[in-house]
Amino acid sequence: MEVTLKFILNGKPIEVKVPPHWTLLRLLREKLGLTGTKEGCGIGECGACTVLVDGIPLHSCLLLAPKIEGKSVETVEGLGGRDSLHALQKSFVDHGAVQCGFCTPGILMSAKALLDGNLHPSKEEVKEAISGHLCRCTGYQQIIEAIEAINKDVRE
Amino acid sequence: MIPPFDYIIPETLEEACNILWEAGKDVGVIAGGTDRVIGLRNGDHSPRLLIDITRIPELRKIEEQDGRILIGAAVTHSEIASSPLLKKYGRVLSDAAYEIGSPQIRNLGTIGGNIVNASPAADSLPPLMVLNAVGKIVSREGAREVPLDQLFKGPYETNLKPHEILVHIGFEKLSSVMRSSFVRLARREAMAIARMSMAVVLRIEKSTNLIEDIRISPGAVMPRPQRMSEVEELLKRKSPDEAILKTASQKVSGVMVRTSGVRSSTSYKAPVVEALFLRAMRSCLEDRG
Ligand SMILES: Cc1cc2nc3c(=O)[nH]c(=O)nc-3n(C[C@H](O)[C@H](O)[C@H](O)COP(=O)(O)OP(=O)(O)OC[C@H]3O[C@@H](n4cnc5c(N)ncnc54)[C@H](O)[C@@H]3O)c2cc1C
Ligand code: FES
Ligand code: FES
């Protein structure tokens, strides 16, 4: 049995049929062709699948699709594209915060949620915001710097 | 892979109770799903139908009523951690909520799910024990109020019936003379769940410097959440000096060993639970100002 879901995806209202036992992650990747959101662990430990639901970072691997009925979902595809990078994406590139890139889409979404609610986060707040993300490559330092650079840009 | 099921999101409590009652077997309740979805993936359970209770208004609010605080079962850990009402009147619980998992887990996981899942390591349970929390449970058959320390049968086992819903948890507000503390072993470096913790509520009579009220509940060291009443009795009407704290801490590990039996991990756990107890007590004592 499929259910029909209506929700806002990256700012646009959509309607889609989905089996209710699918996760939002599976819906995004397998039905909507949005493969920017990654599946790492599938059990809420790594953060690679993080998307924003009504502005709040959640693991899409643990979120059953029917839960997003009527809500607004933002994925990395909504942040910016190849020719129109979001300030955060640009800052990640500039600071060498992307190596293999597997963790990047998820971290970008948590960083966006942080900055949307708090234009001048402290280093501690930045660390806290990305504490649910694992990165095997960077050691986190460049990622923290990339996010902090944004709030400096705004201040200047 | 998650096996297929149907999914209903009722808008009212009555509707949810009716569906649960009529659907009979192989039906389950789901809140945030942070435990449930992992169970589905692992094949621990394969329900025919899931009832999502997160859009029922009564389950979504934190309120103050006649000197008590009521927390809806579907309130998330993030909402508990940031609630001004809880910071003021139930700090031991909001501090614990802030320690749970990661931001994403706290944004999705609920207090009701934490309780009903009944993991011995669930972080909200020791605080709820020292707050003397009472759960309100409803079904088509009616409503009942259950002190939470009577809800748990063992690890991952409660006496909730399959058609019952936990609506809210209530406790008497901690007054400003009460001190409380929640301490946990590792502060989220690892996101693994097996972590020991300690929750304490303490009131010292100013004029006599004697302990008038003391409530102690450890996390992840006993098969089910409970208070350590033996240690509480030992401390009552005593002056909180180092000697008595030391004696009490040894009693804490003694009770732990007696309740959970001697295991390979005991030699590691005993000094840790003692240290956690001392840290929690000292944090309450320093806080007296
Ligand atoms: C990566 C990760 C890290 C975690 N870290 C921690 C941690 O540090 N500390 C900790 O304590 N927990 C942790 N957890 C466990 C989990 O997040 C919590 O137990 C959470 O509170 C569960 O709530 P939920 O709403 O997601 O429950 P669900 O998964 O929706 O439900 C859990 C169980 O409770 C039942 N249930 C839920 N609500 C009700 C209700 N109102 N009435 C009747 N039955 C109900 C469901 O039927 C199910 O059996 C972690 C989990 C993950 C995946
Ligand atoms: S894939 Fe969701 S947290 Fe790892
Ligand atoms: S850049 Fe490779 S995991 Fe983070």
Image: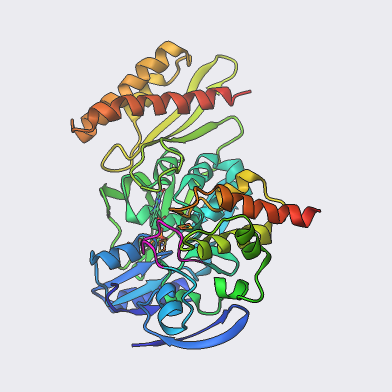
Horizontal arrangement in the rendering, residue B216 relative to residue B24 (left or right): right
* Residue A97 counted in the magenta span: no
Residue most toward the top?
A: B243
- Total marks shown come to 0
* Residue A42 counted in the magenta span: yes
Front residue of B262/A16: it is A16
Residue A98 place in picture, x, y as percent = 53, 59
Front residue of B116/B274: it is B274
User: Which range of residues does the magenta coloring cover?
Assistant: A39-50
The quarter in which the N terminus of chain B is drawn is bottom left
Horizontal arrangement in the rendering, residue B170 relative to residue B256 (left or right): right
Which residue is pictured at 57% across the width and 62% down the height? A108
The quarter in which the C terminus of chain B is drawn is top right
Q: Main secondary structure of the magenta part?
A: loop
Is residue B210 positioned above or below B56 on the image?
Answer: above
Front residue of B197/B200: it is B197
Is residue B246 positioned above or below A99 on the image?
Answer: above
Is residue B12 positioned above or below A115 on the image?
Answer: below
Front residue of A62/A151: it is A151
Residue B183 place in picture, x, y as percent = 46, 34
Residue B123 place in picture, x, y as percent = 41, 45
Camera sees residue A74:
no
Which residue is pictured at 36% across the width and 47% down the height? B192
Which residue is pictured at 58% across the width and 42% down the height? B89
Is residue A57 positioned above or below A146 on the image?
Answer: below
Residue B169 place in picture, x, y as percent = 46, 53
Which residue is pictured at 74% across the width and 52% down the height? A152
